[in-house]
Image (tube, coloured by chain):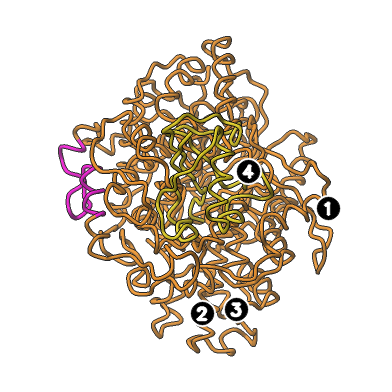
Amino acid sequence: MSVKIHLHLTHRHYAGGLETVETEGNTVGDCMDDLLRQYPGLGKELFEKKRKLKGFIELYLNSESTHPDELSTRVEDGDEIQVLIMLAGG
Amino acid sequence: MALDRKLAIIDLSTGKIETKVIPLDLRKKFLGGRALDAYLLYNHTKKGCDPLGPGNTLLISGGILTATCASATARTHFMAKSPLTGLLGSANMGGFFAPELAWAGFHHLVIKGKAKKPVYIYIHNGEIEIRDAAYLWGKTTTETQWAIREEMGDEEIKSCVIGPAGENLVTFANIMTGIKNAAGRTGMGCVMGSKNLKAVAVRGTMDVKIAHPVEALEFNKRFIEQITSAKVNQTQGVLGTPFIWGATNSWGGVRTRNFQYNQCEDSDDIEPERIDEICTETMGPHHMTGCFGCQVHCRAQYKIPSGLYAGKYDEGPEYTSLGAFGGEPDCKSAVTVLTGNHLVNQYGMDNLEIGSLIAWAMELYEKGILTSKQTDGLDLKFGNDEALLEMITRICYRKGWLADALADGGIPASEKIGKKSFDYLIQVKGMNNLHSDERGTPALALNSATASRGSDHLRSRPAIDLYHLPEKVLRRIYGNPVPYDGPLSSDHTEYKGKPWQVFWQENCYMAVDALGICKYHTVFLGATLPNFDDWPKVIYYNTGLEMTPQEIFEIAERSNMVERMFNLREGLTRDDLKKGDMLNHRYFDEPCRRGALDVVGAKIDKKKFMKMVDELYEFKGLDKKGIPKPETLKRLGLNKEPSHQL
């Protein structure tokens, strides 16, 4: 499946300034793995350890939160993942 | 019935106590809590009253849902004219006080006058008495609560109290209940101190009848699922609010060294995970706790691990204390943060205000504006943990010239210090800012500048603006219950569309404060949490009152407008740096120096900022000067205020 991942503004410099990255996979986790294969610098920003997202990172799939399934959520061709950071401003 | 809860007018000068039914038409216009308090303040104070005089009126309230089957109805609200700002004073706390007040028969207390000697108010199942508090005077907040329980022989009594700071009329003294629940902002504890009122203690066993109990409980199950399944609340249940500080600091949104930097570097010892370790080591793995009826449990318990106060128990620290005693003064020790948090809780002082003031004084000291003579020899440099903690105690007891000046608040202190010290003071309307740095986030800058009680993150902040939510999600939230098809942007550096988000959040938070529930149960930090569309059923099942989402939105608009009217009556002027909707010049002139690439170099464009204020005023129905248009007052039914209906 071809899935587009939208990066938060503050993460884009880890992906050469790209706003979106094209990935492949059957689940959100697969797509995130593909994202990290392309841009390994994003790993420490998004994950506490392998396959565990940080507490303040949330992933949306087609404008709906993937929590609590998160990485195991199935994706379809043409889906879009949004990476959110719960910064909250202080 | 929740709607049967009464209002009491207590005159401390005469000792007269009067109880009244709250008319249904006022409930329909203001619901309760902060919203009805705004109406009461506008009606029960005269223009220009002395905040520390008997003419000021202190309101204490629960929301319309308090002690019903709805979740997290723990919040107690306080309102008066602020001794810190001279404008609207308003503060809100969690804990267990408001439900106990409702079980004792009351939703609203109107406290007037001034007692001749220290007193406390005791409320028990519809009865109210004014009791001697001479033996309580001088006690800390925790000591006071336990002393009242001991005197009355009832460990279930819940009290809201002041500590020594309120007695000493520190203008940002707060009101506390429990160990750490604080009505922190705008000096409501100072107002209590000025009235010689040490505490309000309540004990109630009167049933709050639920209009449709089966449906209320059933519906609340859905609410609990919605609230506890949100990732933000699950993270809070593990790390508490410090998780916000950690994420935001690593991004570059935390004020450091007053306002010189926007990120606290090398701060591993005060990262949320480290605080969690200390809580686990001192209190065990199950150290998170919560307020009445809440499932989130965002509050950590800890003991101070070392130092002068080693072994002392406390709760928190909230992310506000991490900023106040960590980032702003550039002190990077967990023990210092935990100790500072403990001291302000015991003294009864606003952690945000005092942390920001001390950091300001440190910058003035660094620049030579303050001398060691003025600090009484204290080496008030950034990163001096001992000096920070010493200043907290000095300010509480007004020890020394500088501490006494700071205890009066930032603007009066700047007038005493002189030498352009005001230029460095990070405040709006006389209240110092939270530790967040909004130079890279126009929406948050607008919210800070225009919030009704001074610079604030809990009155109109669209915090989720920083998340980069998809536009479709933003439209889902901000397009209801009032249609909006103007611009909305997922980009937090944008200016377009932000005024609507601030306007919407202002009304969302007012509605929450009128219901008496916690902001973590609405669209504050989580986009999937309940808001206007979800509340009509909660209100109906619990109280029997029928409301549409649009009507709730209008109630919030009306109540916010009354707060605006109060501020205007007390001298708010749009661009006034001390009493207006304006930011310190540093937001416009000094770019951010640290953090992520989207933050470095960021500052607020003043021209675009002023345009945002114009747009926000338009949404609120204000003219260019920030004064309500006649048609707005008519639409909201406020053209005859003060109406003295209650």
**Separation of marks 2 and 4 at Cα, in angstroms:** 33 Å
Where's residue B471, x and y in %? 35, 39
Label 1 element class: helix
Q: Position of residue A32 (x, y in %)?
A: 56, 44
- The secondary element bearing badge 3 is classed as loop
Residue of label 2: B363
Identify the residue shown where x is 35% and y is 20%: B548
- Tell me where residue B384 appears, x and y as whole percent: 66, 78
The circle drawn on residue B282 is 1
**Image-quadrant location for residue B97:** top right
Tell me the distance, in whole angstroms, between the alpha carbons under discs 2 and 1.
Answer: 35 Å
Which chain does the residue under circle 1 lie in? Answer: B
Chain of residue at mark 2: B
| Lower position in the chain sequence, tag 1 or tag 3 | 1
Q: From mark 3 to mark 4, how far is it between C-alphas?
A: 30 Å
Q: Colour of chain A?
A: yellow
Q: Are marks 3 and 4 on the same chain?
A: yes
Same-subunit check for callouts 1 and 3:
yes
Compared to B575, does B423 lie above or below? below
Residue at horizontal 39%, vertical 46%?
Answer: B460
Name the residue located 49 percent from the left edge and 87 percent from the top edge: B367
Report, in whole angstroms, how far the alpha carbon at label 1 lies from the one at label 3: 29 Å
Q: Please name the color used to draw chain B.
A: orange
Binning the other alpha carbons within 10 Å of mark 3 as few (below 14), some (14 to 19) or many (20 upward) gives many
Amino acid type for the residue under numbered disc 4:
Gln
The numbered mark, 2 or 1, whose residue comes first in the sequence reads 1
